[in-house]
Amino acid sequence: MTEIATLPPPRGISIFSEAQGRIPGNKGIWVGIYCEMTEFALMFTVYFLAKSHFPAVFQEGPTRLATSAGTANTVFMLTSSFFVVRALHAVRGDRIKSAIRWLFLALMMGLSYLVVKFLEYRWYTSQGIRISSSAFFTVYYYLTLNHLVHVFWGSLGILFVLVRTKMGAYSSQGYEGLEAFASYWHAIDLAWLGIFPLLYVLR
Amino acid sequence: MSPERRCDYVWIFLIGLTLVSAWIAEASFEAGLGITLLVAAIIGIKGRMVIDHFMELPHANRRIRFMMRLYFLMLPLITLLVHLFGDAIARATSIS
């Protein structure tokens, strides 16, 4: 018993130690963000391997995609991220009404992304482009459907923090939840910043 | 410069890079080394800007910052490697 009592305290094993600097939001959200980034890293690996094996298919595939839809959705994702940052700045300055407006605009951007993606898929279907059309489209649907799911629940997340902001949950004295959500939403944006150039631009 | 104003400029710059990407896609350039380098550079720059200015990681936990920045260094680098050594990667990953 004496030996146990004199043991030194266990060393911290968390990679998210506060000693390494401030953690935006909270540790939990960063575990989620790294899970998400790992998931997309695996999907990007599939993309790179498929492209190495079927270069001709990956050269032709992007020419059949709607660049305008991909570009519009990149603008929507970047703009929603920007609006969320501005909402965070507003909360830090106790400008709650302004924060609510920014979050509402961010939600509109998220919903716009979903509408454009739905119309884009519908157009591809009418063109006879399906998940089994080629290795490129298998990877295309695999990556973009997965991202779509993230944007969908991310938009629900915006709605959640919007309601919480209206209820007075955040102020300059405490905004951990909003900052955690903002970090997650930016990670969803980051995933799209990889998807758009690889699938729509590079051929 | 206030953080708000800095973010405004970052957003405008990011939208500008997106329009450059759209132009590259619509111009239907052949996927030569130059275009691949340009697209890879845009991926890296946009990722780094979101990480530094929107996620606000420059003064945050250094391990979080390191891993996020590394991600957007590796993604363009692998894009370039696949362009240069796609055949070799395909041979190395074939089952036969």
Image (cartoon, coloured by chain):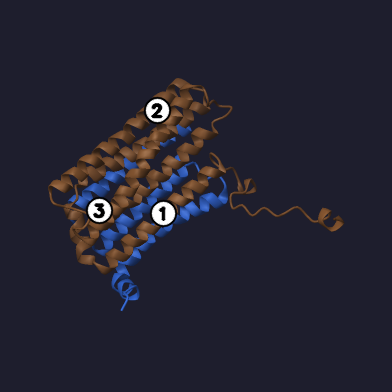
Report which residue position mark 3 lands on: A201
Please give the chain letter of the residue carrying mark 2.
A
Under tag 3, what secondary structure? helix
Image location of residue B71, percent across then percent down: 44, 55
What distance separates the C-alpha of mark 3 from that of mark 1?
22 Å
Residue A128 visible in rendering: yes
Q: Nearer the viewer, residue A74 or B93?
A: B93
Q: Which chain is blue?
A: B
Kindly identify the residue that appears in the image at 46 percent across and 51 percent down: A35
Report which residue position mark 2 lands on: A102
- Reading the chain from its start, which is encountered first: label 3 or label 2? 2
Q: Residues within 10 Å of mark 3 (few under 14, many from 20)?
A: many
Query: On the picture, is A79 further left or further right than B69?
Result: left
Q: Residues within 10 Å of mark 2 (few under 14, many from 20)?
A: many
- Quadrant where the image shows the C terminus of chain B: bottom left
Query: On the picture, is A76 further left or further right than A57?
Result: right
What distance separates the C-alpha of mark 3 from that of mark 2?
30 Å
Q: Which mark is residue A39?
A: 1
Kindly identify the residue that appears in the image at 64 percent across and 55 percent down: A13
Image location of residue B59, percent across then percent down: 55, 44
Kindly identify the residue that appears in the image at 36 percent across and 31 percent down: A107
Q: Colour of chain A?
A: brown
